[in-house]
Image (cartoon, coloured by chain):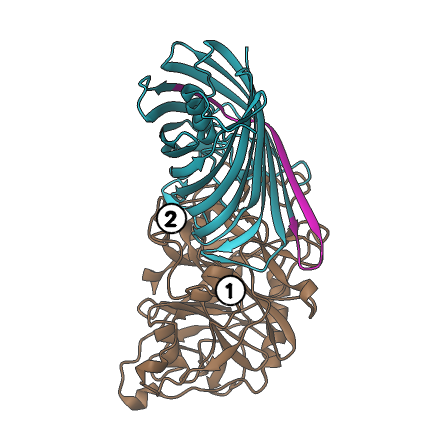
Chain colours: A brown, B cyan
Amino acid sequence: MTSLKHGTFFVMVLLILGCAKDTYHDLGNRGENIPRYHVIEDNVNGAPVVVVGNQSDDLIVAFSREVNGYIRSFNETSEFLPAVMKDGYDNYYDIFGRAIKGPDKGLELNGVNSGMGFWFAFSSRYPGIELYDQGTRDYDIILEPDHDWLVPTAFVSQGAGFDVIQSLQEASFEEYDVRIDDPDIQYLVRDNDHVIIVNFAGEQRVYPLSILYRHEIVNDEVQGIPISVTHHPLTGTSKVWIRPVISSEESFGVSGFVYNGNMLAFDRATLSYWTQLEGLCVYGPLRGEQLDLIPHIETTWKTWRNFDRTPHVMTAETGFSHNYSVYPFGDYRTNHNAISHPLAVDDDRLPRKERVFCIEVDGVAKAYRMEDF
Amino acid sequence: MKILFVHRRLVFIVTMLIYFLHPQAYSQACCTSAVPAASNQLDFNREVYGLSIRLDYDHNFLNDLIYEREELEDDSRKRVSNTYFLSLTYMLDSSWGVSVALPFVDKVETNTSLTGNVSELRTGGLSDISAFIKWQNTGRGNWQIISTLGVKIPTGIVDEINEENGILYSADLQPGTGSWDFLFAVEGVYKIKPRLLFNIGGSYTLTTPADRFDSQISYKFGNTLQILMGAAVPFVSGAIEFLPFLNLRSRFSEKDQVNDSFEPNTGGFWLNIQPGVRAIINNKVMFSLIAQAPVYRNLTGVQLSTSYRFQTGVLINL
């Protein structure tokens, strides 16, 4: 598992985008307040990164600052949306790290393994994790793998039954037009509901967490390329992977096992177990294999409609009769005492359920708080 | 065949047995299968003071995947739970009795993936021992009342590990629960006619949390309320007294809890039908056979639930 592998892949992925969906508009012309996205230039495990986000928008993303072997400098901008930052060469970048204006227009920054989640999920997975502006904490703990696992089994536990939480094998989408104010066609997603946005292979798709709360994994296909969009409600973490091949046998399911409280997916072909946070196979015939991660954005439905006026949103036509408008776990998201599984470390530097943004590079992680933006 | 109204006390006893002779009368069943809970076995024979011994076998087959009130078309998972009970009862006098039950359980969970791969999980061993005190009225009116107070002691195995992958089995797959539970039950039998008895009863099980993973996690099965109602038609054939009966048993379970959080996909309401028959020989030996099938279910989330169940047993007054 290396950031280089991820970075190389991200470049390839972004090059595939080609004629990416461009629904951008200049909100500045509409006279609306343009939120300033704050930019943090930083290093994670020696890798230069840029983290850009806005607390009120509930949106943070991160990219590598290395471009063609050189480290670029970035600053924030509020000149126009969708530009959220610019570099020292007057290139303006959108939320996907694409230069949309400037001498290097079309340039795409490499992504890094990153995403939102509850503090306890990252702090237990990466003991002593560095907290931006606060440093690390020392923990006298060694996570030794055992019993043919690549992780210590003391922190692997079974929650739901095997394959009880039913992953989806396909998804349908519809175009949502924000210019239509008819309340009768209001989508199931509400303003403050969170969504995952995946910009891949020339398409941009929105996956409501309201659906993923019930299924945790959506096995989708974009331009013929199989992907899996995942969200684990217990850790609040989301990741998107490339699936190895196109077939139902290669789809991922929810094993019901968790490691440090975080989902372990399984592949239906070999029944191997994969961590969500790294896409690493930790048990089974494919132990040691690494999935290719795809960058994603997680934010609110309201925020995303500012970036995309005609988003393609996954529908609730899943074949199941769940009531997706209801969060199924009560007060779990705000109850800091509600922890269902053993954790290697219970780091009290932050409240357990505080949502933070985490970047991981070669097994070393760093977390950023929303208030940093 | 001669149909007689059997001795009132015997009817009373047997009727009481209708309810209480369910080895897993207070078992929980989420996607899980019945976790052996307090076995409310209060077999005693008022005709014979002293000791009686009973052996029971309970077979619980779970293959119905239920989402709230809907049965899903999914045959990929099932669980079979076989429980063997050894119970000893001692009558102190005509009203008071004490009883202890030792359960041994064997559970097998089978999951079949979309590609046909089958995984099997198996646990077994001593479950939680239960102890009871029972009281019944001694009057000769049409109503016979029995009340029970019991405790389930966490003697069962709670740390079974999957030998294949080294992972601790989930709480509901373990033979024991690791928790002290307390139950209270009351049942009444009313003689409508000499050949027709009506029984109604209820029980409440109060559960407590049990520690797992070096006390980092506490797991508490949901408290359970059960209501039972039924009728029996006693008759005698030769030297054997028969008591065929039909009960409706409802069960409401709260959601399980992990630390301070309610577990999804646990808890709900079940309504089952229970036909059965008991045969009593010379007031010394009794055989029983009870079946159970679901009539209505309204569960929380998605759960594996009982498709059918049956229990059989023999009681011997020593």
Q: Residue at x 52, y 16 (%)?
A: B283
In this figure, which residue is indicated by the disc labeled 2?
A: A352
Q: Residue at the spot x=32%, y=85% of the render?
A: A182
**Is A181 in front, or is B224?**
B224
The secondary structure that most of the magenta stretch takes on is: strand
Location of residue B2 in the rendering, given as x and y in whole percent from the top left corner: 53, 27
Q: Is residue A370 left or right of residue A257?
A: left
Residue on which disc 1 sits: A48
Horizontal side of residue B150 vs A48, given as left or right: left
- Residue B107 lies, with reference to residue A285, above or below; the image says above
First to last magenta residue range: B111-133
Asked if residue B190 lies in the magenta stretch, the reply is: no
Quadrant in the rendering for residue B72:
bottom right
Q: Residue at x 70, y 50 (%)?
A: B118
Residue depicted at 48% across the width and 18% down the height: B100
Above or below: residue A354 compared with residue A152: below
Cα–Cα gap, marks 2 and 1: 28 Å
**Residue B147 located left or right of residue A201:** left
Query: What is the chain letter for disc 2?
Result: A
Q: How many residues crowd around disc 1 within 10 Å: few (fewer than 14), some, or many (20 or more)? A: some
User: Residue A357 placed where, x, y %?
Assistant: 42, 60
Is residue B42 in view from this perspective? yes
Q: Nearer the viewer, residue B7 or B47?
A: B7
Residue furthest toward the front?
B2
Q: Amino acid at mark 2?
A: Arg
Mark 2 closeness class: few <14, some 14–19, many ≥20 residues within 10 Å: many
Nearer the observer: mark 2 or 1; the answer is 2
